[in-house]
Amino acid sequence: MFIYLSKKIAIPNGVKLKCVSWNSEQGWIACGGENGLLKVLKLESGTAKDPKNRNAPASSNLSMNQTLEGHNGSVMVVNWNENYRKLTTSDQYGLIIVWMLHKGMWFEEMINNRNKSVVKDMKWTSDGQKICIIYEDGAVIVGSVDGNRLWGKELSLTLALVEWSPDGRLILFCTVQGEVHIYDGNGNSVSKLMLYCLEGMQGAANIIGIDWCAASTSASSDSRYDTAEGGADQTPPVLAIGLDNGRIQLMRNEIDEKVVLIDTSLRATRVKWNTSGTVLAVAGSQTSADMREASMVQFYSPTGVHLRTLRVPGTGINALSWEGGGLRIALAVDSYIYFANIRPDYKWGYFGGTLVYAFNKPDRVEQCVMFWDTETNDRYAKYVKKLISIRACGEYCVLATKSEEADQYILILCNAIGSPVDSKYIEVEPVHMTMTQYHVIVVSEELVYVWQFRTPVSRLTSVDSEASSSLRRKEGRERIFHIDDKQVMDENITNVAQKLASGNLSTKDPACALCASEQCLLIGRESGIVNRYSLPHLAFDKTYVLRCRPQLMALNSNSVRMSIIDINGVLTFFDMEAAGEGGLQGEQLPLERKDCWGMCWSNDNPELFAIMEKTRMYIFRGMEPEEPVLSSGFICQFSDLQIRAVLLDDVMRTPDHPDKDFLIDFETKSLRDTRHILTNVGIDDAYQFIEDNPHSRLWRILAEHSLENLDFAIADKGFVRCADYQGIQFVKQLQLLDDPRKQHAEVAAYFKRFDEAETIYRDMDRMDLAIEMRMRLGDWFKVEKLAQSSAGDDALLMLAWNKIGEYYADRQKWSKAVAYFAQAKNAEQLVECFYLLEDYVGLEKLIHTLPDGHPMLCNIGKKFLSVGLCEQAVEGFLKGADVKAAVDCCVLLNQWDQAVELAERNDFQQIEGVLSKYANYLLEKQKPLQAIELYRKANRHTEASKLLVKLAEEAATQKVNPLRVKKLYVLAALEIERFRNKTLNPDNVLQGNSTYHTKTMAAQTLDGLMTLDAASSGDGPGGMENAWHGAEAYHFWLLAHQQLYDGNFDAARRISLLLSEFEDVFDAMDIYCFQALACFYSKYYGKCSRAFIKLESMPGIPADKQELFSELAVSIFTKHSPNDPSQGKSRKTKGMDDEFAVKGKIASQCCVASGKELSGESSTRCKQCKHSSVNSELQGRNACPLCHAPLNFRAGGGRNGGPSLGGGGRLYGM
């Protein structure tokens, strides 16, 4: 951090100031002094978007200077309420005035005078809602922002200062006796704050300042806020209490016991945090050796580290106040206000066009490291814990952080997008760090660590050849040595801890600065001694002696001269090759500059360097400065007579969204003069000027200017002097051209003024040259326009359209690419674009557009296959003459019917084997339903039916879900029906009346009947009769149970008699047990007796069960005679009861809805299962009770002959 005085404002009539306060939000400065003096000032601030003011430092001109009248005595206290834009002032007589802003002027709003005692201090809460006013006699008044008194209290204390806690819940009262009392927000005493800074002190001490900073999160992620025990305390000290003897106590809160104690050795008058809580300013005075009183301000970090001392003229500092951003501080000294500018120690670096900088976010504990590509404006954020410093060089930067473990640090090598390239764990604290193209050097107070890092490129290119043909890759080397050692060990050190553990590491002359180049490393020490080491082979070289304690050091491009900025901001130079006095190495150069805070050597000229002195930038050639430029930027680099600086103060205001306007480029005087001479004088004079001030960029400018004037001789000399081989060859090519207009066009193209070159070619009527230039540039949009203007042929247009399509395709703008590929008739690219766009309609149209056999047709088929569109894929494969691929596509997409059809049509025999293998595979995997679906899709109905019957039989053995068994039988029967329809109605039957056609149809019909007869045979498990027979059995079984449970015992009895026909499906014992039960409940004891006779005489029934049946029969028929109730004289009814169950296929003659006999009843026959239902029993149902096929009804409400064959639909959902 550097600080310097930048402005002084004199108060009229020499009135001495007593207080000053800077509004951190709006920038107003209030100052009060003797004789009722009260002023409100405001310094001008340049507009952020104004390019004229952007580079200028903070303005010193006053935009407001208003004197406020109302006080008669000396104004002792001024305080801002920033949230409500109010100013509160108090004078020596106790008069309090609250001022408000109205139309740009300050006016009195409220006045209060207690007339009893003097106001010693007053403070607003951080939110501006409350104000606490304390009087010397111990009176305390707390009021609201609108002037209402909240509470008051008389304390038995002699009060001096007051401070609110950041949350407004506590009030700290300081007494003149040096005590701090803690009260809550309602005036209740809480405790007494412990002042550790009073320990060991003789005599009394007064408290001169207390400041509790509200912005405590800004530095919480900084690794410097670690406790002495090694653990990280995420809350830095924010409460500062200062005594008049110069002792300062820093605390994290009111009960903190791990306080930070500072002895400033000043007679302190004021202490004040900056707005972010990162720097504490202590104002006071000190007596020098010659007994002169010197006023000064000392600056400390929250951990008590001394950062800087600012000496101030005058007899004493009465007050101080920080600007809102912490970049300026105002000091009230006698009858003057001094302003000092602060240059913070930002953590930043610049390399390869990338600016890397660190900042804090309120919602994150870690620090955010932003990598900003200043060319493309891309930003990459990286969050790092406990960041210490950042250095950059070449193509990489290094981040130094503190590890979670005690006394361990991490070096992270990153590229331009923040990706880690390499890292090292070290145990040397990175107090000072620098970086070269190949080395990272870290220096603590006594140890030096050198890391020769390896990048991904150097790891591949850096190898050592051995005697054998094998190659050994070099690894990055680490060296560590003590700063007092004159010999550096040659061996690689991999375990730094061993070196740290050996011996005493302390030194009497700690390191305080360092710099390095590719040739050497310089380490400055507090005594002024500088150690020089050679690089890359690290070895101690020599020692230099400086006249100051260095703070910043830098080497010029040839490592001959060194610049030094000491702790007082004085810049000096040292020539390391000159012979010094008394046999010492090097010589101090006479040039010396004060108040310098930044310096950068040119990387291509050892005589050029730039310095930042206060608010000006000076560029030196040798020891002669050029005219200064107003600037507050930090110098990034100095190259090619141009300096790039960055306005880090502006960047840190909006760190997430940096603006390119924050980068400023400055040109040296020689560069500006060269441009001026070339423009206003002539080439010859410019040539002579550059001869006197040679630089490669100046020669290049001369060569380029000569090219514009077609002065090839001077241009050739300029390119030779700047070693531009391509420029030399370009001049030779220009000299071969015979037309000056062509030469002008080529020169315009060389300077990237392509439109100008095209215009020249147009004027020459040489469109071919314009097209050739655009083709070399890859500007195919221009080529298309030029070709369409009758300057090109169709082949050129096709090429342009293809290139434009590729341009859009590379940027994934597929829709635009399609338009150009379609014009170019590029089928290959169209296929890719349609596929990526998922435009399958366009891809299908492309199939019809391409001729048969085109190689892209099979590719289109593969595209459709990848997304599961079988029909379109098959179409593409077939048109591409790849039948096998079409069949394979159907197989992969499980479209077996289409696969079989294609195989049969094209005599592809392998499909049967594939089908069988896949079906067997599914069956082995216990996936019978998938195998059935496979057979159905392949139109293998008989195989599907067999599997369904097998599943039904397996389900029947479980006797768990008879409805599922029925469904499986019905499905099996429907598959047989489909097979029958297919067999008897072939699509390839020839139509006609000729005898030949009749014979052909007859033969095909006969073959179909024979095939149907073989498949429908009842012998096999999948036969048609067996399937319908099983479906009938379980239908009537379910129907009988439903009637029984519904209490329709006669209907249940009637259906149970039908079950005797299905002894091949059910267990006979189950059938007759149910008959006996149904007849018992319907009181048909005769038929119940027959059922028991069957059960008792049935072979295969265990004897114990037969005995149970006998016992049950005896218990029933001892109470009821085995006779059926009278059924009347109707023969039909008798036949139903006595003969119905023994007729062949009697089930087909009864109603499948109720089990009634069909004779004499109006019924509807299902055309699918050929079973009938009594219309009155359907009860409004529109589907067959057995197979669930839909039934058709007559228009008049009656029922016709049944549904069509196609009405069955898919029944897997039954």
Image (spheres, rainbow, N blue to C red):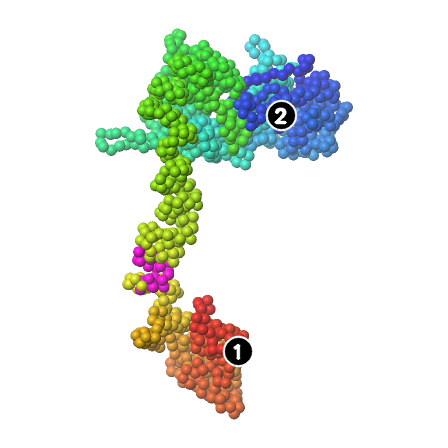
Left or right: residue 1096 versus residue 1084 is: left
**Amino acid type, mark 2:** Gly
Report the front residue among 403 and 785. Answer: 785
Left or right: residue 319 versus residue 504 is: right
Above/below status of 728 relative to 424 = above
Is 902 in the magenta?
yes
Numbered disc 2: secondary structure: loop
Q: Position of residue 1118 (x, y in %)?
A: 51, 88
Crowding around mark 1 (Cα neighbors within 10 Å: few <14, some 14 to 19, many 20+) is few
Which residue is found at the position 51% from the left and 18% from the top?
Answer: 629
Above/below status of 560 relative to 1031 = above
Res 41 visible: yes
Left or right: residue 128 versus residue 114 is: left
Q: Position of residue 778 (x, y in %)?
A: 38, 35
Report the front residue among 619 and 490. Answer: 619
Q: Residue 339 has which mark? A: none
| Residue at the spot of label 2 | 27
Above/below status of 1118 relative to 212 = below
Q: Position of residue 1068 (x, y in %)?
A: 41, 80
Displayed quadrant of residue 1067: bottom left
Q: Residue 1198 has which mark? A: 1
